[in-house]
Image (cartoon, coloured by chain):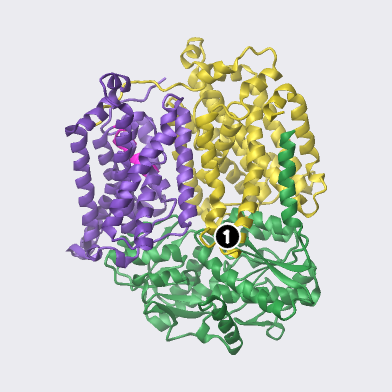
Chain colours: A purple, B green, C yellow
Amino acid sequence: MDLQNLFDMSSLFLQQLVNGLTVGGVYALIAVGYTMVYGVIELINFAHGEIYMFGAFITFHLITVYKVPFFVAALVAVATCAVIGILLDIVAYRPLRNAPRLAALITAIGMSIFFQNVALIKWGAQIKSYPLEALPPFFSDVAVRIGDVQVTWLQVFILATTLLLMFALHTIIHRTKVGAAMRAIAQDKRAAALMGINVNRVISFTFALGSSLGAVAGILVGVFYNAIWPTMGYIAGIKAFAAAVLGGIGSVPGAMLGGVVLGVAEVFGAGYLSSQYRDGIAYAVMILVIVFKPSGLLGKAMIQKV
Amino acid sequence: MRKSLIWTAALVCLVGSAAWAGDTIKIPVASPFTGPLASFGEGVKNGALLKAEEINAAGGINGKKVEILLEDELCDPKEAANVATKLAGDKDVVVVVGHLCSSASLAAAPIYKDAKLPAISPASTNPNLCKSSPYYFRNVYKDDFQGAFLARYVDEALGWKKIAIFYETNDYSIGLKNAFVAEAKKRGLRILGEEAYTSDTTDFTPQLSKFKMMKPDAIFIPGYAPQGTLIVSQAAKLGMKVGFFGADGLDDDVMLKNKDAEGLFVTTPFLPDAAGPEAQGFIKAYKAKYGVEPNWFAANTYDAVGLAAEAIAKVGLDRQKVRDYLASLNSPDKAYKGVTGATYFDENGDCLKAAFIKEIRGGKWVSAKKQLQ
Amino acid sequence: MGIREFLEEHPRAAVGAVAAIALILPWLPLGEASGYVTRVATLTMVYMALALGLNIVPGFTGLLDLGYVGFYGIGAYTAGLLTIHYGLSYWVILPLAAMNGALWGILLGAPTLRLTGDYFAIVTFGFAELVGLVIRNELWLTRGPMGIPGIAAPSIFGHVLSKEWEFFYLMLAILVFVVILVRRVENSRLGRAWFAIREDEIAAEACGINIIRYKILAFAVSASIGALAGSFYARWFRFIHPDMFKFWESILVLCLVVLGGMGSVVGVMLGALVMIPMTEILRVGLGAFVDWAGSAGFTWISPDLVNARYLIFGLILVLMMRFRPEGLFPAVRVRGEMHPGSERERDDEDESFYEARTDHEKEPLG
């Protein structure tokens, strides 16, 4: 192998790493939504992926139909998704709080299908892109270039946003009253209620928080790939769930770590092994972790074994 | 007995929808009209309706009006099989215009064959299609021709020697790719790498990053426009400076909205500015009715409907006779003369049509400066 | 009289009426639509078989299987590949497909059936997605998204089936076989063990039931029924494609089971009887409506409204769980009528249908 070749190989490696971190950051944002909801009400919120899709589409709608500037549209979309998340819980999940787990799980799947098709009817099945002129022009500029490796400002923006939001989330969970309430509910809902915590309000807050992070992820992905479509939430949602499982479901730092690890693994898998099995990596990781190490990387064992 | 009521209601609905056959001649046009490839279907629909309108304005077929039945199959093989069964069971249908996607046509072919129902595809280019059934015809070229044509064009007209290929795993894309590679190797072009994607892929950066290090002159995308436009813009985001070319699957106005697609070359069976005098009336009427230039889907469907109508006019409403009539158009002098040139079939039901090259310049499709004969 | 009351009072008459209608269906004077109606009826029976198969897992053992379509796909591809490569008769393929389904059921079930509800659901989901990926990408084996065209139709004593009514009766025979199988199993030692597990796992174990083994058996039987339906589907459609075995199909079958009533053999079949023709009616009806809206100038109505039927399935799942989780045609009353000796009470069953959520030790957030 000559020197040029070696150089090419290493810059390919670096480029893939940057791509992987970008994707992983987004998975992490979605994964924390799953993990927080699971933490407080022990439900796999299948419709979470659709909230992520709504984030991308509402932004798109505001930009193209009402000509709202990008950042304003994004903020409105995030706020709307938070409301959708709260309503989702109140309308669909809250009535089933004491029902069998299976009923809640089927409801979550039903809501996911429902949301997907609302978007399909509203916006159509075709892939849509954000109009380039509506996006901040600096997005496509190159921020860093080393040899053949380049990182655009968009990628920097995605990574920075992810880090910032993760830090904010950590602060909310550990430094605020409502965060303490969330942790209390996750440990024991009944005891938390006895201590005077308004359980339903805290659950609503959790949904709002998780949904807004999911919406941010949807918008970032929409801009990064230049593509949004109604079923985008389904695969992303499952992958993020796999990330949450990998990190240890219920654990917020675990979800972050799981997201990044999965994103990098996926991009390297697609780049070096087989691009067609890219999605399979997430499913395989998920199955293996659940079967062999159900507690994940950072979680505590919590699967009841018979 | 409410369930039998439900059944009866179901039956009444079905019978009702199938039974209002009047004094018209039904020509079904099967294609995606909704779903991800709906924009292809738009041209199909417009071309078919325009032709039917013209036939009816000229007195119809032997005094009967033509009615186009738009059958939406979403380019989904399963839906295509359903639609085909429905049409096969409809005794008023003697010829089908469709389907658009090769995989949909391949799914429908055995059903039409069993029902001895002839079909004319305006757009399915998979080489195996017409060979598989004596009842399938097409008025479009095959992918082996198209792929080889592209290799010749790239070599002779563009001078690109190092090519990377990014194909979708479907009949259309793989057939094209194989034909291209075979011809390219004969000509001494270098194929640096081949990467596959599926129709639900949206992130192409890992594979593009790999291509980037190989430094190709151009990337060949023998796929469809929804993914094509993503590949082109994601390559631009990675800072790649390469040429792009593809086949008729990329011939979609979606590409025009993408500024990174500037300079893209594609093959097409129909070019308004290169079309013969017989096409000028069609182009004018189409523009007047729909406000846009016809694309090749519109032109080919226009001709396929014309061909179907001519067959019915000549031999009547009989599936076998229509099939035999189509098969009898087997030489240039017996050909059907339409807006896309002369259409006549070989023993398989395939036809020989010219291919053209167009490119995107200034956000518009224009014919490439150099055309090969 | 409501359908449920009618069923309760005259279960045999109802079943007989359905059977009679089913038997003569292809001969009803429907004119041109006859072939189409027969085809829809055949499809309905395919889904009935699928629903009966899926029903075993959540209905009899209380676990949610989200990956049922995986077995359906395995059966279809087994049949398709054996047909085009080796030209095997359908009567040889039928048991082979069922066995292959069972094999994968055991391979998947053995390590995963010890998991509880949510995790089992998600693992089965992942399995089905992996099956889909393999079907889609192993071109040398499955031709991937090109599908497998030209699968020969089955033949009986040298007569090759080609008419819709011939397939109709073949599927009817398969369905009758599946129903008898499910009924027999239900009333056997095996079936009683499943019920015991569903009612109270710990008590069942204390009674000496090897829970994992019985769960794996349930899973294998369920998987083989799915594969059986798939094998018919392949030889009937004569073309198979990865898109036919997407996650969506799992949801559709789940929807049938939920609507009809989990655990109820008659219920899930009625679920299919209502839903599958309804999908077709909605397809035709919504399509006509969209065309009309387009021509009448209601441009704000998107042509994608034709997809609204999927939206309805989502709503059905949600509303059923909220207001009638036991399904429209729940198990026990019907079963009670048919087996007067049974002492089960419906309320009992509702209570213990699935393990209620338990507060086990959890990881604190943070």
Image quadrant of residue B215? bottom left
Q: Nearer the viewer, residue A107 or B256?
A: A107
Quarter of the image with the C terminus of chain C in it: top left
- Identify residue type, mark 1: Ser
Q: Residue furthest top?
A: C207
Residue C28 horizontal/vertical position (percent): 81, 45
User: Would you say A46 lies left or right of B106 here?
Assistant: left
Rendered position, B25 above or below C343: below
User: Would you say C187 lies left or right of B219 here?
Assistant: right
| Total marks in image | 1
Residue C312 horizontal/vertical position (percent): 55, 43
User: Would you say C56 lies left or right of B221 here?
Assistant: right
Q: Nearer the viewer, residue A194 or C84?
A: A194
Quarter of the image with the N terminus of chain C in it: top right
| Residue B321 visible in this rendered orientation of the protein | yes
Task: Pinpoint the chain carrying mark 1.
Answer: B
Rendered position, A247 above or below B305: above
Say whether residue A240 is magenta.
Answer: yes
Rendered position, C220 above or below A257: above
| Residue C155 visible in this rendered orientation of the protein | no
Q: Residue furthest front?
A: C297
Residue B7 horizontal/vertical position (percent): 72, 41
In the image, which residues are magenta? A238-250
Residue C197 horizontal/vertical position (percent): 52, 18
User: Would you say A41 lies left or right of C97 here?
Assistant: left
Residue at 64%, 44% in the rendered image: C278
Helix, strand or loop for disc 1: helix
Main SS of the magenta part reads helix
Rendered position, A172 above or below C290: above
Rate crowding at label 1 as few (under 14), some (14 to 19) or many (20 or more) other CA atoms within 10 Å.
Answer: many
Residue placed under numbered mark 1 in the picture: B103
Residue at 35%, 43% in the rendered image: A83
